[in-house]
Amino acid sequence: MRKIYVSSIVLLALFTATAVLFAQDAAKPRPKEEVNANSGTNMQLPKRVTPGGPPKAEAPKKVFPYPIYQKHMENGLNVVTVPYQSPGIAAFYIVVRTGSRNEVEPGKTGFAHFFEHMMFRGTDLYPKDKYSGVLKSTGASANANTSLDRTLYHMTGDSKKLETMFMLEADRFKNLNYSIQDFKTEAGAVKGEYTKNSANPYTKLNELVQNTAFDSHTYKHTTMGFFEDIVDMPNQYEYSREFFNRYYRPEYCTIIVVGDVRQEQVNELAAKYFGDWKRGTYQSVVAPEPEQKEARAVNLQKQASLRSSD
Ligand SMILES: [Zn+2]
């Protein structure tokens, strides 16, 4: 039963993360007051067309049937609460509006995904092992993933330990620290991940298609980055600091808490742990892709060897 609760609120949190991410334009000024976004940002189903007659007047249906409460903090952080019937369980998500599309400089691809790894290296206050120990004590599971447009960090656990989740996440988002040696070790792990993924022909084909389909836009490279940039990554320690400094800032982030929680409680914890997080200054500008004038094609051929099992 517990498993059902966990997986359903994780799905809810994921859905909310996606809806919130695409419903907002980061460049637009945000209202400071608290709003119930259920009336404002929810997607609505298109009106049904009735064959043979005019469409019947009916109230538009909401795709997402739960209330979404948002608070835009002074420092630019967006805090979203979705109370949901899941006794004792809460999912805590942080969406960083930075994916591989934000890797705009030549020779510096793969860093959004790289930080997904580095964020588990810990801080001075909570080094890796201590972080894992505290996380275990809350009974929470945690992980992260990166896409073209965002990086997502998530925890799901005991709703009574929500403050611990806030504390842990605020600490690493504000104070991530790592040595050059840690940096190089993780860069090696990313290279290994690229090599492993490349053994899958679908992954390799996707990489080639993106590279062929785009000329200017950063969708040209996958979230892993260009291989030559991954190989050079161990030499980019200083740049990694710059990347973190640019994007791990409140104005690039949305916190989403779903489950057995209250809006006031979430907003209070956000103010307590993220209120002093300093806004950054970096504006990410991605080159637009020119109109495509002709068909493009790419061919992938791989050698395969078949062995008899006996
Ligand atoms: Zn990875």
Image (cartoon, grey):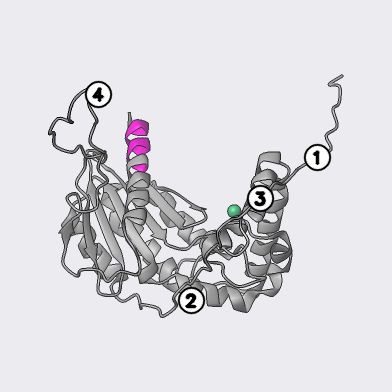
Is the C-beta separation of discs 1 and 2 under 8 Å?
no
Amino acid under label 2? Asn
Range of residues picked out in magenta: 2-10
Question: Which of the 4 image quadrants contains residue 184?
Answer: bottom right
According to the picture, the residue beneath numbered tag 1 turns out to be 302
Secondary structure of the residue carrying tag 4 is loop
Name the residue tied to disc 4.
51
Q: As rendered, which of 48 and 112 lies closer to the eye?
A: 48
Q: Which residue is mark 3?
A: 207
Mark 4 Cα shell of 10 Å, populated few (<14), some (14-19), many (≥20): few
| Screen quadrant of the C terminus | top right
Q: Would residue 208 be visible to someone looking at this image?
A: yes
In 3D space, how far apart are the residues under numbered discs 1 and 2 (Cα atoms)? 41 Å
Residue positioned 18% across, 25% down in the render: 53
Residue 180 in the image, given as x and y percentages of width and height: 65, 74
Q: Could you tell me if residue 124 is visible in this image?
A: no
79, above or below 261, in the image: below
Q: In front of the other: label 4 or label 2? A: 4
Pointer 3 local density, CA inside 10 Å: few below 14, some 14–19, many at least 20: some
**Image depth: mark 1 or mark 2 in front:** 1
> Which residue position holds label 2?
245
Q: Residues within 10 Å of mark 1 (few under 14, many from 20)?
A: few
Pointer 4 or 1: first along the chain: 4
User: Looking at the magenta stretch, what is its main secondary structure?
Assistant: helix
Q: Is residue 213 above or below residue 63?
A: below
